[in-house]
Image (cartoon, rainbow, N blue to C red):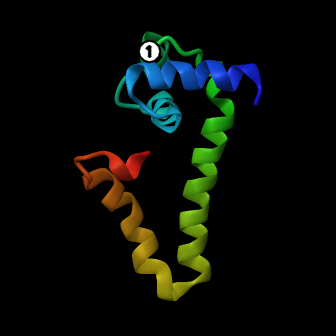
Amino acid sequence: MPAVFDAVLAVAREHGVTVRELACLLRTTRLDGRAAVRAYGADPADLRTFLAARGLQGTWVLTRALRFPAEADAAHATPTTWLQDPSGERRG
C-alpha cells in the first residue's frame, strides 16, 4: 500500500472516521470540505483515489437501476437508507 494511503488511514483512525467519510466530506457543498478535511489533519490531495471510488459507487447504483429494472427500487433506496441511518454504520 502506498505511503499516502497509510497516512490518510492513520488520520481517519485517529479521529474515528473512515477514509470514505473524509472523501465525502471533501466533496460536500454544505461547508468548505477542503478546510474540514485539513482540520482532521489530512491532505485533500491524498483522497483522490477514495473520491474516485466514491464516484464509482454512485455510478454503480445508478447503472444498476437502469440495467436491472427489477432492482430500481433498491437502487433508488440506497442513498435514502444511507442518509437516514443515524448510527452511521451503513456509511462506512
Task: Name the amino acid, label 1.
Answer: Tyr
Q: Position of residue 55 (x, y in %)?
A: 60, 48
Q: Residue furthest right?
A: 2
Dot 1 lies on which element? loop
Instruction: Identify whether 49 is placed above or below 59.
Output: above
In this picture, residue 19 sits left or right of residue 76 = right
Q: Position of residue 67 (x, y in %)?
A: 62, 80
Instruction: Identify whether 33 is placed above or below 53.
Output: above
Q: Position of residue 39 (x, y in %)?
A: 43, 11
In this picture, residue 80 sits left or right of residue 3 = left
- Residue 21 figure quarter: top left
In this picture, residue 17 sits left or right of residue 49 = left
Q: Nearer the viewer, residue 7 or 28?
A: 7
Q: Residue furthest left?
A: 86
- Residue 81 figure quarter: bottom left
Q: Residue at x 32, y 60 (%)?
A: 80
Q: Quadrant of the N terminus?
A: top right
Q: Quadrant of the C terminus?
A: top left
Q: Residue at x 47, y 36 (%)?
A: 24
Instruction: Identify whether 14 is placed above or below 64.
Output: above
Label 1 crowd bin: few (<14), some (14–19), many (20+), radius 10 Å: some
Instruction: Identify whether 71 is placed above or below 6.
Output: below
- What residue sits right under mark 1 in the picture? 40
Q: Residue at x 67, y 31 (%)?
A: 48
Q: Residue at x 34, y 49 (%)?
A: 89
Q: Position of residue 73 (x, y in %)?
A: 40, 78
